[in-house]
Every structure is written in C-alpha cells, then in structure tokens.
Amino acid sequence: MTVVFTLRTSSVGQTRSLAVALAPVLRDGDLVLLTGDLGAGKTAFVQGLGRGLLVADRITSPTFTIMQHYEGRLPVHHVDAYRLDSPDEVFELALPEVLDEGGVMIVEWGERVRGGVDREYLELAFTFGDDDDEREIEVQLVGRTWVERNPTIRTVLSPWTREG
Ligand code: ADP
Ligand code: MG
C-alpha cells in the first residue's frame, strides 16, 4: 500500500516551512526516511521538522555522530546514515528498539536503513531542480498508518505540490 506524489520548493526557507507544516501530522513511532545527494536539503528539512515539533535546540549534522536525540512535542531521533557501510552497522544501532521507546525517527540517507527496519515509513526523495535553489521532493507514503493520513498530508503540503 503506497501513495506517491511530488513537491517542489524554490528556497531553503520553503523546504523548512514544508517540514514545519508536516510536523503536526507526525505521531509516536513514526519513521521518516530522507534520500538525496549531499546538499539536496535533507538536513534543512529535519531542521524544519524540529521547529514544527517544538524542539528548542537547533538541529545540526555533527560529523561523527550517527544518532542524536532531541526533546520536543515528541522525542525526536535524528539519524545521519551517511557513514553506515554495512547492514551489520545498521543492525547495531538498534533503530527499531529506539523507536519502540517512543518518539519519531528521521533518517538522512534513509536508503541505507530501509532494508534493516521492518516498519512502515514516510519517504522523501530530494533531487536538484533546474535552478540553484529549486528542489523536487518525491513523497512516498508506505503502509497503512501513512496511507490513512494521505488526505491530511496532502492538505498540509498543498502549497508545495508540484503542478503539471
Ligand atoms: P543535505 O542534508 O541533503 O546534505 P543540507 O540541508 O545540509 O543538505 O543543505 C542544503 C543546502 O542547499 C543548504 O546550503 C541550503 O541553503 C541550500 N538550498 C538551496 N535551495 C534549497 C531548497 N529549495 N531546499 C533545501 N535546501 C536548499
Ligand atoms: Mg545532511
């Protein structure tokens, strides 16, 4: 059960705003996977999500920390899987167990954990647009818990829905 649609932003501020708008839809136990090359806007999105989830700290991407935890409306577990090379390393992080304790998990380079976490997820795939500040974001809602939220998600994200 999967729903796919595409968004477009034309500034980093829009990408952050889009994430702020999405934040109220998130629930305990949610997994959000972000894919896209370096500089595509994954961390910018996480920063917006943090703001929308009322995280007081500024979310950053420290070079050698794979997982960081923040307190907001819900606990936020921010994972940057860039340095994970093998399925063993993913397994050792015990991501499902962390998520079972509560909160939402947002994973940059999400394709590296997708196969190791048996759970429904929301995926956003960031790609570069024609202009420097333009990004296309393909959204995939995978599984019942996400598809049932499709109408709400489409409504909150409608300002950035790609036309044509
Ligand atoms: P990633 O985490 O995917 O490597 P970052 O969020 O760290 O990417 O960086 C994205 C960079 O691209 C930032 O310098 C940001 O200012 C810039 N940028 C320009 N336009 C956009 C946009 N529409 N959405 C997100 N970031 C953008
Ligand atoms: Mg990043």
Image (cartoon, rainbow, N blue to C red):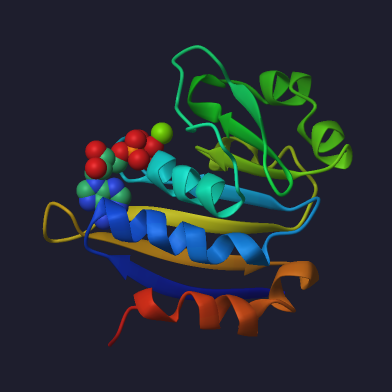
The quadrant in which the C terminus is found is bottom left
Identified at 88% across, 37% down, the residue is 101
Front residue of this view, candidates 95 and 88: 95
Residue 161 visible in the current orientation: no
Residue drawn at the location 50% of the way across and 19% of the way down: 83
Image quadrant in which you'd find residue 66 = top right
Instruction: In the rendered view, tell whether residue 111 sits above or below residue 30.
Output: above
Q: Residue at x 46, y 18 (%)?
A: 62
Is 128 rendered above or below residue 63?
Answer: below
Q: Position of residue 44 (x, y in %)?
A: 38, 44
As rendered, which of 57 and 76 lies closer to the eye? 57
| Image quadrant, ligand 2 | top left
Q: Residue furthest left?
A: 131
Which x, y percent locates residue 5?
A: 47, 76
Looking at the picture, tell me which residue is in the foreground, 146 or 86: 146
**Viewed as shown, does residue 105 lie left or right of 136?**
right
The quadrant in which residue 161 appears is bottom left
